[in-house]
Amino acid sequence: MAIFEKRVELKVNLDDTEKISVRIETAQNVAGHTEYVLRVQRGPLSENSWRLLRRYNDFVHLDKCLQISGIELPLPGKKIIGNMHPEFIAQRRLALQEYINHVLMNPILASSLPTKKFVDPDSYSTPFHDLALQNASLCLRADGQYALGQSLGPIGWRLRKHYFRVTQKLSAGRSSPGQAKHLVKSISQSHARNTIQSQASASNGGSSGGCHADATQDLILGWTEYGPDKYIDDREIHATLKNLSGVQHPYIQPIEYMTSNDSGALVITKFQGHGSLKDMLCCVQPVNPFLTKYGNPKGRAPLPLKDVALYGRQILEAIRFLHSKGLPNGHLHAGNVVIAGGTARLLDIENFILGVPAFYRPFFVQHSKISTFEVVDVYSFGHLLYEMSMGYPLQESVARQITDCPDSLRQLLESILLKDSCKNGLPTLEQVAGHAFFREHVPNFQDTFMQATKTTKPHLKWSTAAKEQLKIALQKAEHRLRDEQKSVRNQKRLVRVQEWMSSEEEKKKIKTKARLEQKQSKLRQQTSLQLQNGPPATPLVLTRSDSANSVSTSHETDSPQPPPPPPSLPNLSRTTDDLHPSTSGERGRYALLDSICKFNKTSLRRVASDD
């Protein structure tokens, strides 16, 4: 009865951090306009590629969507007359290739939804926001404690994570009418913008990193779809998230509420008026769109060295605590850290359970030594430390040179971010926490930490099933990471071999061309010498007549006007001076002498004689 069995279709969750490359192969004329054929490839494998047809207007539309980032892009200008000429189309194809390369090389632009739709419309035409709104509404309706409000728009870098305003219902019995928790409205409402700015300014006017008292009452809901590394069973993930919602640590942001369904999970936390640590470094409002905030921020403010050491040490303690409980972080970056009351706190610690890709995954997949989640956290911490101390993020996987910082900080950054460090191996979390940089700038951190734990005792307890699920998920996630690193390594090796083969072919072509030029040079020299010495003399052939004492000459080659024959030679034994008693011209004389010197007796034939 197999025909009545239910067909199960597995949903393939894409890794949105995989590198996308585009190559414009050719251009074609379709119905009076030009269409460009694009070859798009996701990841290192050439098998995962497809073709697209794009017109120039499609590039213009993409450029308009990316203009809010403030990044200047080299889009070629529009031309009305002569735009169908083959030479113009070839030049425009090269210019559009340069344009799309600039877009994909920028991490901010490459991760945006307009760029994803442009290169992969089949995968990114889904209404992600509408689906998130639907799932979040269903989850909150089932619980009955919170009411979903308006959307905050694309304030984060993840395409499959959406933020909403949320309020706590009075019927839940957890707040009075005057204490109803709410989140600020969307920036699309002009009257709310002033409120947000006033809250942010009030929070910055207090203690370092602190926030306004009213801002601590705001709540934000984040809905996240499951990612490609989601390996926890569907029957256990709800219980696992419930255990995680009870986490307590002075350097981890408390979770107000957490639930999940078959598509993803939602998390409700307190909203900080000044936003994340990245918002503070870029001096931007947290509710602005992601492209506007981080594309080309007008001002950047690196943290004081003492704050860098303090916040870095607090983040390390939070990560070490999670690892001790069997939960790797793997998602550390400036956008997942908030500063509240002079204390750094981690956000989104549930990302590993949800299986979403990490922010720095395109970087650490290039290094085979970064193959465990502890090393991933150390590597991500190095990038975070670099951004806090410099004020801007490191746009490459490794740092070529680190300057403009104290020696102790430079040594710590070099031990994590240099190419040799990533190649030979990174330090452990324990080694980083005990580095001289932290001992020098926060010598009394242990006393501060012990005092903080008295107020908020670290706590995270898993069930037996959750522990087993986390262990299995960790093994599978690291296995997928190593497989991807192997593919990247093989692709790099293949590219090097192709470059070497092409270089060898180029060398052969250069050698062949050099030989040909040398031959042509010799021929030109010979020709010039012949022209300088005059035209070559016409060789003469001596023939013997019936008379033994007579010799005549004849030309081997026909000429239009042969010179007159020399006089007969009565005696062959006479000298050459006697042959020409009168000068008949140097040319005829040289021709005669040449024919005499080249005379060959074997060419003579026997003749019957009467003697």
Image (cartoon, rainbow, N blue to C red):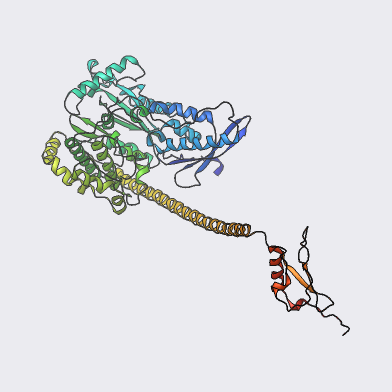
Residue extending farthest bottom: 611
Locate residue 312: give its quadrant.
top left
The one nearer the camera, 272 or 605, is 605
Query: Farthest top residue?
Result: 191
User: Residue 527 is drawn in which quadrant?
Assistant: bottom right
Q: Is residue 273 left or right of residue 445?
A: right
Q: Position of residue 384 (x, y in %)?
A: 27, 39
In the image, residue 574 sits, relative to residue 282, either above or below, namely: below
Say which quarter of the image contains residue 236.
Answer: top left
Above or below residue 233? Residue 61 is: above
* On-image quarter of the C terminus: bottom right
Q: Residue furthest front?
A: 582
x and y, in percent, of residue 131 in the image: 43, 28
Residue 118 x/y as whole percent: 48, 33
Q: In percent of the image, x 47 and y 47: which residue is there?
A: 45
* Image position of 412 with respect to 85: above or below: below
